[in-house]
Amino acid sequence: MSERWARAVLSAYRLGGSLAYPVIGTYVAWRSSKGKEDPARRRERYGRAGRPRPEGPLIWMHAASVGETLAVVPLIESILSYGINVVLTTGTVTSAQLADERLGDRIIHQYVPLDLKPAVSRFLDHWQPDLAIIAESEIWPMTILELGKRRVPQVLVNGRLSDRSFASWHKRAYVAEALFENLAHVVAQSDLDGERFAALGARPVTVSGNLKVDTAPPPADERELQMLQRQILRRPTWAAVSTHDGEELVAAEVHTRLRSRHPGLLTIIVPRHPNRAAALTEQFAGMGLKVARRSAGDRIEADTDILLGDTIGEMGLYLRLTEIAFVGRSLTSEGGQNPLEPAMLRTAILAGRNVQNFRDSYQRLIDRGGAKLVRDPDMLAGAVNFLLLNDKVRRNMIAAGLTAVDEMRGALARTLKALDPFIQPLIVKSRLKGTQ
């Protein structure tokens, strides 16, 4: 009965997608009008290839957005060293830009096809991948089923399941099992993630650690960095990065409370979604704060209160301007954001308590003394004040964060070991092709 029910649910999903396909263009057009799609490449979302398929073995790698793309760049570079072609799909314009910056024409980038049978089938008919590698938590039923029907091995790497996702799948356990049985291997980020995938029917499951630990810190343009440092001089600074709605105002309120205690204090606010910058600037101005917007090229003057980091791809720049970073989506929102980049770039890390999506990374940082969780805005203000006043404590936290990151490294090697049984036949196939 349960198996029949799962098949019925998945059949309904397939049918619903087929019925929606003729009108899905309106949705894609709307996303394009909001800057969420590349208008010149919209056809790729329907599975229509923008490039010819190269000869030889080919791996399809999928990473949803910027964070997942960054995580798999070293993995892709390792695969490319074997002489295997890689098609990388992502779902956002910013991740496509990142792929071009980091990997260039060494890979073929395509926007991921919509999870509808006509689009997925068209994509697979053209690219005919020998192996599909999916990053983190991208579970798309139609894609998984179509790959399974074609007997293409599917491996989930850097796999994670948030509390909410696990609870949702657990309610539909039979559907989850019908999907996850198509996965040839799950390489999970943590023991807890591994246990969750296994509970939902995935086999086999191994644990690698977080691939993001084995990536390089985000870069910064050295000339831009030096220019901003000259404008800031010796002013005390702290940053609130990857913030979500409500957290920017919390950071601004912390600034107003601390600026009399720390003359010249500069607060750096980097919202997760820069398109909110205009509204934030108005709100800050209403609080009597002077704002310099990075996107406008505003100069940081002696009386500037807030540097608003409303640009994409410059996190490495902002984090190099301070030694204290509050990491958002953790105080007024839930789930948290990745604390590893701030740790790599030598900041003492603060965050709210809602960091479930990065539980393992935060726990390791906290255990070492590199991060501290705060329960409310008052506690955040107190923590920032304390770290500004105590150089030794701040530097000890920075050193502890670097130690924790070093201890977490090794995920890339463990992931490659798990992938070896799938990649070795492709290496042989590639070499045989080269001798013909």
Image (spheres, rainbow, N blue to C red):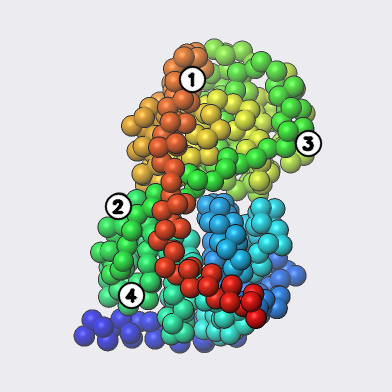
Give the distance between the C-alpha atoms of the residues marked 4 and 2, in whole angstroms.
Answer: 19 Å
- Please give left or right for residue 23 compared with residue 50 in the image: left
Give the distance between the C-alpha atoms of the residues marked 2 and 1, in whole angstroms.
Answer: 31 Å
Q: Is residue 115 visible?
A: no
Circle 3 or circle 2, nearest the eye? 2
Which residue bears the numbered disc 1? 395
Q: Give, as a three-letter code, the residue at label 1.
A: Arg
Q: Are marks 4 and 2 in contact (CB under 8 Å)?
A: no
Which residue bears the numbered disc 3? 297
Q: Residue at x 47, y 51 (%)?
A: 412
Q: Position of residue 174 (x, y in %)?
A: 27, 75
Q: Give, as a three-letter code, the residue at label 2.
A: Leu
Quick one: SS at disc 3? loop
Give the distance between the C-alpha atoms of the residues marked 4 and 3, in whole angstroms.
Answer: 52 Å
Which quadrant holds the N terminus? bottom left
Outermost residue, front side:
435
Instruction: Answer few, some or many: residues within 10 Å of disc 3's Cα (few below 14, many 20 plus, some between 14 and 19).
Output: few
Q: Give, as a three-letter code, the residue at label 3.
A: Gly
Which residue bears the numbered disc 2? 192
Circle 1 or circle 3, nearest the eye? 1
Q: How many marks?
A: 4
Which residue bears the numbered disc 4? 181
Q: Is residue 395 visible?
A: yes
Q: Position of residue 95 (x, y in %)?
A: 62, 57
Which quadrant holds the C terminus? bottom right
- Please give left or right for residue 332 compared with residue 301 in the image: left
